[in-house]
Amino acid sequence: MTRMDRREFVRAGAAVGLTSLSGIKGLPWWETPDLVLRGGTVFDGTGAPGVEADVAVVGDRIQAIGRVPEQGAMEIDLTGQAVAPGFIDIHTHADRPLLDVPMARHRVLQGITLEVGGQCGGSPGPSSEAAAQAARERYRKRYGVEVDLRELGGFFRALEEIPPTVNAASMVGHGTVRGLIVGNENRPATPHELAEMRRLVAGAMAQGAVGFSTGLEYTPSGFAPKEELVELAKALRGTGFPYASHMRNEDDGVLAAVEEALHVGRVAGVPVQISHLKAQGERNWWKAPVILDLLEEAREAGVDVHFDRYPYVAYSTGLSNLFPAAARAGGSGAFVGRLQDPEERPALEAYCRDKIAQLGSWDSVQISSTRRAENAWMRGKRLGEVARELREDPFDLTVRLLVEEGGSVGMIGFGMSEENTALMLSHPLGMICSDGSVYSPSSSGSPHPRSFGTFPRVLGHYVRDEGVMPLETAIHKMTGMSAKKIQLVDRGVLRPGAYADLVAFDPATVGDGATFAEPRRPPTGISLVVVNGAVTVREGGLTGERAGRPVRGAGA
Ligand code: ZN
Ligand code: CU
């Protein structure tokens, strides 16, 4: 950590403050600050090293950074702590669930102040009339407010009615749009359907979406050929917002899948964000550096590509993902039917057993959620372990579980290497994401710890303990770098005039409490989180403030 001579910095800070302030309308920089954070080491989110400084906040904005002589209405001493922009989770599923769990306790406790949802092809809008009606009744009953999710813009308005503790942005999901226009069918879209989908994507972008995402390993997104993705991504051309790709494959076919994602960006002429990049399965671990070379080459050839990654060697998905996407066409009922069909079963069994071989063994799969109470004892256990206890063949057990649970069982797959995880987290093109969601404190199941510990895990385990990258670099990958990818200019960086989204933590003690065995344990070392100027976490506990807002893209 480098330290500028303090007096020199005060002058530099004051000068910077004054020049930028002159251009900001309505920011009363001469006013008494509402909040002054004293004596922390300020990391501004640009990747620059930390500098000891005070931070003054007026209303929802940063007023000044430097030496602040005025006494604030509220003063917080942060001597010995790092102060950074609030963390931006560039790939998260905490979008629509925020309306159900607006306190988002385990999200804001880890320093997240902005969730970028609508990922993996699924967004909170547009929705069918029926789904929107169900949502309308749900939230009317629960909060007495009117929510309209027929369009993505309605989700942003809902966040204003039911404010969460954190801010939220959203991409528009390809699976969501394809489900509405084509349904859950394994076929290319007709020209008319393609035009309809493109109209929906463009409409969502105009309402404030910050990108277009696919979930090509899922249905119905995966039923689209490459040409469809190019056509739809073209709706973003000229906006600067990215095509975010959960690629068609993340294991044996990952190199071709990376090529496809880059092809879409190149031909459509849009930036690319590869979602939760990984090389899954031991026999594919050698591909990680090859993928990174492909991305670097593509950048040199003019494709504005980046990626995101979570700090764990295990991924999280549905148990149905052990089977090919084609087997899931037509929805869960059809999938469960195929699993029981003696004609189809041998091919499905071969595919599933190969997927397990690639992961290592049946013990590489942990059951994370089940719907039925009688299977609840399996949550948190490995498939192999459960099979041994029941003296049942693990494949038979997998099929039986999926049939009993209507095709919907959550799983965690231990498929990545430590070495590649560190390599990807620290790579200059990589940003930090959780790929997690928000859970109600009363929910059951044993979800992936990434939803609870991602950001403190990077800062504690990977930065402090493993030394994979400098602290300022890690902070940049969770703040300014992510903001830039979705073209936010007033979040993700600390400067006068920017929104006062801030986090303070002790670099010596910051860490994740969450483990695969006990995912819900809170993090350590994060003392303060400020969202739009409101102190939301203090001394590691929630204050009750819910100052989060919708963050609409510049296209709105
Ligand atoms: Zn995904
Ligand atoms: Cu995801």
Image (tube, rainbow, N blue to C red):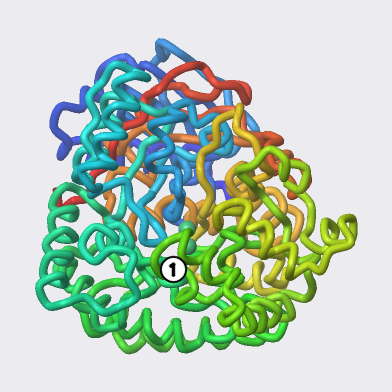
Residue 437 locus on image (x, y percent): 51, 45
Ligand 1 under 8 Å from disc 1 Cβ:
yes
Residue 377 locus on image (x, y percent): 78, 42
Q: Is residue 23 above or below residue 469?
A: above
In the image, what residue type sits under mark 1?
Answer: His
Q: Residue at horizontal 77%, vertical 60%?
A: 383
Q: Is residue 73 above or below residue 153?
A: above
Q: Is residue 8 visible?
A: no
Q: Residue at horizontal 39%, vertical 73%?
A: 222
- Left or right: 524 as drawn, with respect to 500: right
Place residue 32 in its image quadrant.
Answer: top left
- Left or right: 487 as drawn, with respect to 322: left
- Left or right: 354 as drawn, with respect to 475: right
Place residue 312 in its image quadrant.
Answer: bottom right
Residue 554 locus on image (x, y percent): 18, 51
Residue 530 locus on image (x, y percent): 45, 28
Q: Nearer the viewer, residue 129 or 204?
A: 129
Q: Nearer the viewer, residue 314 or 456?
A: 314
Place residue 300 in its image quadrant.
Answer: bottom left
Kind of element beneath mark 1 = strand
Q: Is residue 499 above or below residue 367?
A: above
Q: Residue furthest front?
A: 342
Q: Residue at horizontal 24%, vertical 66%?
A: 182
Q: Residue at horizontal 46%, vertical 29%?
A: 101
Q: What residue would you read off at disc 1?
A: 246
Q: Is residue 66 above or below residue 301?
A: above
Q: Nearer the viewer, residue 424 or 256?
A: 256
- Left or right: 128 as drawn, with respect to 534: left
